[in-house]
Image (tube, rainbow, N blue to C red):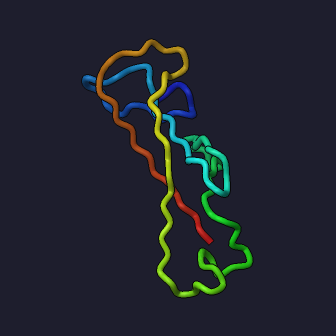
Amino acid sequence: MATDTTLLGNILTLNHATGVGLEIRGAANNYSTETLIIPNESTSVYNDQRDTTNDDNIYGSSENGKVQTHTLNFLATLKRDSNQKIGSGNFKANAIFTIDYP
């Protein structure tokens, strides 16, 4: 577990890197700036879709029933965890993303 709560911690216990964590950001797009995604924080939101309040969900008014795809772009950076001493080794982190769509 990382000391800095904005980072994902290393889940490895043998030959593992220490003093580092993984930062995840949603890439900048037409709808929002680059966004830090904070683990286990329900108010941490990355928006990569236009406002569809008056649409038929992700479809435009003339697209109803068409198959739609949308790529979400994320940036991952291995960073120093607070002011901890960095030690060499392997690193592995897991995350589960929840995607809500209209």
Question: Left of 13 or right of it: where is 102?
Answer: right
Is 85 left or right of 14, judged from the image as shown? right
Q: Report x, y in % for residue 42.
A: 62, 49
Q: Is residue 95 above or below residue 90?
A: below
Q: Residue furthest top?
A: 85
Q: Residue at x 63, y 77 (%)?
A: 57
Up/down of 27 relative to 85, above or below: below
Which residue is at the far right?
Answer: 54
Residue 86 falls in image quadrant: top left
What residue is at 34 percent from the left and 23 percent from the top?
17
Place of residue 36 in the rendered image (x, y in percent of width and height, measured from the top left): 60, 41
Q: How many marks?
A: 0
Question: Residue 6 appears in which quarter of the rendering?
Answer: top right
Name the residue rendered at 50%, 47% in the picture.
74
Closer to the camera in the image, 49 or 44: 49
Determine the residue positioned at 69% across, 79% down: 55
In the rendered image, residue 39, in percent from the top left (x then y), is placed at: 54, 42
Point out the image quarter for the N terminus. Answer: top left
Please state which of residues 40 and 51 is positioned toward the viewer in this rendering.
51
User: On the rendered image, what quadrant is the C terminus found in?
Assistant: bottom right
Q: In front here: 45 or 1?
A: 45
